[in-house]
Amino acid sequence: MRYAADMKQKLTIPAEFAGNRIDQVLAKLLPEYSRSRLKNWLDNHKITVNNEYWQPKDKVAGNETVVVDAEPEEETIDQPEAISLNIVYEDDDILIINKSAGMVVHPGAGHRTSTMLNALLHHVHQLKNIPRAGIIHRLDKDTSGLLVIAKTLVAHNYLVKQLQWRKISREYQTIVYGELISGSTIKTQIGRHPTHRTKMAVVDADRGKLAVTHYRIIKKPHNFTHLRVKLETGRTHQIRVHMAHIRHPIVGDTVYGGRMRLPKNASAKLIETLQNFKRQALHASKLGLTHPTTREWMEWEAELPKDMQELLENLS
């Protein structure tokens, strides 16, 4: 353990954030600190706005003066670990990883070690100086596929802004229960489940954030559909929640899909295939972004992992 240095900072809120909540604005202006930490500082009067104490939900008008005067607090040092990474692309600014299913991206409760972050700190030592070791966005533990990592502060700030402005293209492939007739767009509000706080859910407008998911059909094995899904927004568990919402949950997703759904007259082989598939059938297959230094548009693709390929073969 170590103690973080005093956090004393003064900043002016840009006019473009007018109408947004102060906690949301601070999360964008101070991405190196978690939202929960910033909320805690607001609640405990460690942050003033125009020399006043604000509530997290208070909305800004723009041009307010914010002063952060936080006390030192104990932090955990994440340790480098020699864990293998599937590196798709790397240069001086960015790193593209094809994450395997089962790997946790960031340390948290129950997963303090053996995460992708620990592996990144070993692979690129200077990432210890970048917020969240340069991790710009996350994938669930049991979702495989492409992630971008920033290797410098300049790259990190640029990519965070791209993500906020919805300029990073993220495309997935998934296999869902049931046969969809055509592609479509799902547009709802997503927020914390009202009773199961570890889950997300489709909620009323005043309790969630806008979530937009586009999907197209790749193939329709009998009783199932193989989809290409593109995110317009990036809410927690967005694809999983949206697929369950339209009653076509992702195969293997026990959190949002409930019990395994066996089609009528399912063969012994199909039953065995579904029983042996132990994760949600979701893969981040394509990633596109503007390079933070060259300003060139770049794209990467990662083919379906072996377990999803075999699942499709056995469903056909």
Image (spheres, rainbow, N blue to C red):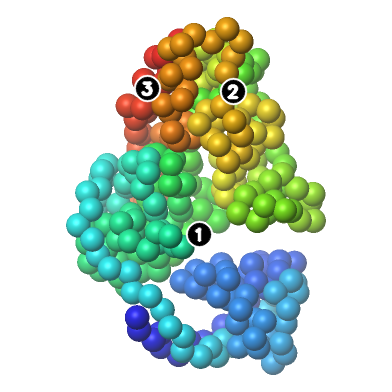
Label 1 crowd (10 A; few <14 / some 14-19 / many >=20): some
Of 71 and 197, nearer the camera is 197
Label 2 amino acid?
Arg
Q: Give the x, y percent position of residue 122.
A: 22, 61
Q: Give the alpha-carbon distance from disc 2 to disc 3, as whole Å.
A: 20 Å
Residue drawn at x 59%, y 31% is: 259
Q: Eyeballing the image, is 65 above or below 237? A: below
Q: Check contact, mark 2 vs mark 3: CB within 8 A.
A: no
Is 243 placed left or right of 202 in the picture?
left
Circle 2 is placed at which residue position?
A: 261
The quadrant in which the N terminus is found is bottom left
Residue in the image at 47% along x and 31% along y: 281
Q: Considering only order in the chain, which callout, 3 or 2, is on the residue closer to the N terminus?
A: 2
Depth check: give the residue in front, 299 or 240. Answer: 240
Q: Given this view, does label 1 or label 3 mark the residue nearer the observer? A: 3
* Residue at 57%, 83% in the rendered image: 11
Q: Position of residue 205 (x, y in %)?
A: 79, 51
Q: Amino acid at mark 3?
A: Gln
Circle nearer the N terminus (2, 1): 1
The answer to whether residue 308 of the structure is visible from this angle is yes
Circle 1 sits in a helix, a strand or a loop, which is it? helix
Sequence-wise, the earlier of marks 1 and 3 is 1
Q: CA distance from mark 1 to mark 3?
A: 35 Å
The picture quadrant where one finds residue 107 is bottom left
Category of crowding for the residue at label 3, using alpha-carbon neighbours closer than 10 angstroms: few (below 14), some (14–19), many (at least 20): few
- Tell me the CA gap for discs 2 and 1: 41 Å
The relative height of residue 278 versus residue 104 in the rendered view (above or below) is: above
The numbered disc on residue 161 is: 1
x, y percent for residue 133: 35, 64
Residue 309, numbered circle: 3
